[in-house]
């Protein structure tokens, strides 16, 4: 009777996957899918995003409440262009006690889990689970050896760990109740898969876990472990594309290092929306994210782009947007062209383009922009710091150009006068060689010939007579030198 009962339990355990609709464990690795979410208008939701979200085993969220409410809205097909207002009642988040308790379960250590969940020690391990963990254990050991090979090539070449690993008898060493791969025990994975199956059956989606900027670094290893164990995980943020000015880049970086497959779904981003509608050059732009809270760092960051003009994109909070506009005005001038947008893609979106001072005055005028309208992230685009988009710079260059033109004109006039003086001197010198009259007569001749005043003619005569005396002295010196040469001969 006992043997019959034991056999019945084993048969039931072997069919447990089919009963709870888990399916046989996959020997392939899981996939991390980066899934963007609407930045305001829920009608931007696409079928591909829908598939990624609802077919995932685990959904890593920036905020489980926002993602839970978004999922509820999508399932109820209440998609509109109004802001996604998070309700105060937690029951409307599409979250239950399992969603909150699973957070601690997944990210606690194995010892803590055994104390917190005694049922893990009693979980029945099926033959399929055993074979699955056996294969994963081999993969883990190979990966560990591969990493050691990179660090200690010489040592590992002597020890030949790959051959040694291949000769081991895994069947004898593995104990299903204590079996652990990537920090996850076999009973825990069965427990987790059961929770996923129950969540999909009851709610139509996998389990939700939080992954934000305050805990991302601590949770990366466990998330990658679940991916290595074959679970498919979708990464989402509150609004927009994960890892772009949002949590996620550390997880993606580690997945690349650990050879985890990554898929990306293109989708909403405030950066592309703003650039496409601002009308500024977009072939070369820089994204600055949120500027530093330190005023000195903000100034230096913006001042760098005065010498390297390009379109700048940055985000700002509603509480600091006025101060940021004043900083832009201080660095680039009050006539600098810029674009500002908030509530993008939503029903009451607002877009303003103009000079920095004009935009600032509009934002501070409650008749034009109510303070209650400034919500969420504010997107600011600064046009390139060139004469095309900055009147002060244009006026400054125009003024500098005029001064340069005046300088060149003055130089040309001096050169022309110099040429005229040289020509007049040459003419006067030519006349002086052949003219044998008095200087007064010579003066009159020069006035008529060159059409110059009596004073200029007098100066020319003085220079001509001076040059004649020099030539006479040179002639005498040459004659004396010639006499001495003949004497020595």
Image: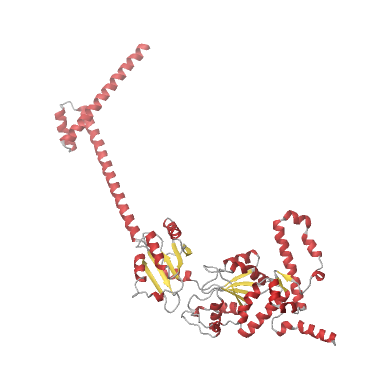
Rendered location of residue 119, percent (x, y): 72, 79
Q: Residue 129 in the image: x percent, y percent?
A: 74, 76
Query: Is there any visible trace of residue 37 in the rendered image?
Result: yes
Quadrant location of residue 242?
bottom right
Of the pair 210 and 474, the residue shown nearer to us? 210
Residue drawn at (63%, 85%), measured in percent from left and top? 202
Which residue is rendered at x = 41% and y = 76% of the image? 373
Q: Residue furthest front?
A: 115
Which part of the image, by quadrant, shows the C terminus? top left
Place residue 142 in its image quadrant.
bottom right
Q: Position of residue 282 (x, y in %)?
A: 45, 65
> Would residue 92 be found to the left or right of residue 223 on screen?
left
Colour style of the rendered protein structure: secondary structure
Residue 61 pos. (x, y %): 57, 74
The residue positioned 76% from the left and 82% from the top of the image is 13
Is residue 24 visible in the rendered image? The answer is no
Q: Is residue 297 above or below residue 49?
A: above
Q: From what the image shows, is residue 391 above or below residue 10?
A: above
Taking the image as shown, residue 36 lies to the left or right of residue 135, namely left
Quarter holding residue 389: bottom left
| Figure disc tally | 0
In this view, the residue in front, 162 or 325, is 325
Quadrant placement of the N terminus: bottom right
């Amino acid at each position: 009777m006992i043997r019959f009962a034991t056999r019945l339990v084993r048969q039931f355990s072997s069919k447990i996957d089919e009963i709870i609709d888990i399916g046989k464990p996959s020997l392939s690795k899981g996939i991390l899918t980066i899934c963007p979410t609407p930045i305001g208008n829920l009608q931007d939701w696409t079928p591909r995003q829908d598939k990624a979200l609802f077919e995932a085993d685990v959904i890593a969220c920036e905020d489980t409440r926002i993602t839970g409410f978004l999922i509820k809205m999508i399932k109820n097909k209440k998609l509109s262009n109004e802001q996604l207002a998070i309700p105060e009642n937690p029951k409307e988040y599409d979250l239950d006690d399992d969603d909150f308790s699973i957070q601690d379960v997944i990210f606690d250590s194995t010892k803590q889990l055994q104390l917190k969940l005694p049922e893990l020690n009693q979980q029945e391990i099926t033959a399929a689970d055993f074979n699955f963990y056996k294969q994963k254990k081999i993969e883990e050991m190979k990966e560990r050896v591969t990493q050691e090979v990179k660090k200690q090539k010489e040592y590992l070449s002597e020890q030949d760990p790959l051959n040694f690993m291949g000769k081991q008898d895994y069947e004898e060493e593995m104990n299903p109740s204590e079996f652990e791969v990537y920090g996850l025990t076999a009973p825990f994975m069965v427990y987790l898969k059961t929770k996923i199956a129950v969540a999909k059956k009851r709610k139509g989606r996998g389990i939700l876990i939080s992954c934000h900027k305050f805990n991302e670094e601590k949770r990366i290893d466990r998330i990658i472990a679940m991916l290595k164990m074959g679970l498919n995980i979708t990464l989402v943020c509150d609004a927009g594309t994960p890892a772009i000015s949002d949590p996620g880049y550390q997880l993606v970086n580690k997945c690349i290092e650990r050879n985890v497959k990554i898929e990306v779904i293109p989708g909403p981003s405030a950066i592309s929306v703003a650039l496409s509608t601002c009308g500024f050059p977009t072939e070369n732009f820089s994204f600055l994210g949120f500027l530093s809270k330190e005023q000195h760092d903000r100034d230096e960051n913006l001042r760098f782009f005065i010498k390297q003009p390009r379109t700048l994109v940055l985000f700002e909070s509603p509480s600091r947007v006025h101060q940021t506009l004043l900083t832009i005005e201080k660095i680039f001038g009050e006539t600098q062209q810029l674009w500002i947008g908030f509530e993008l893609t939503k029903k009451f979106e607002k877009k303003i383009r103009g000079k920095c001072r004009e935009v600032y005055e509009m934002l501070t005028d409650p008749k034009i922009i109510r303070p209650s309208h400034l919500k969420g992230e504010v997107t600011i685009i600064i046009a390139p710091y060139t004469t095309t988009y900055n009147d002060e710079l244009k006026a400054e260059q125009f003024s500098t150009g005029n001064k340069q033109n005046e300088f060149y004109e003055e130089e040309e006039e001096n050169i022309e006068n110099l040429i005229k003086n040289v020509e007049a001197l040459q003419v006067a010198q030519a006349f002086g060689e052949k003219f044998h009259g008095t200087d007064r007569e010579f003066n009159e001749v020069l006035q008529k010939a060159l059409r110059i005043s009596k004073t200029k003619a007098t100066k020319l005569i003085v220079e001509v007579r001076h040059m004649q005396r020099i030539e006479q002295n040179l002639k005498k010196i040459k004659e004396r030198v010639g006499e001495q040469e003949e004497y020595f001969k």
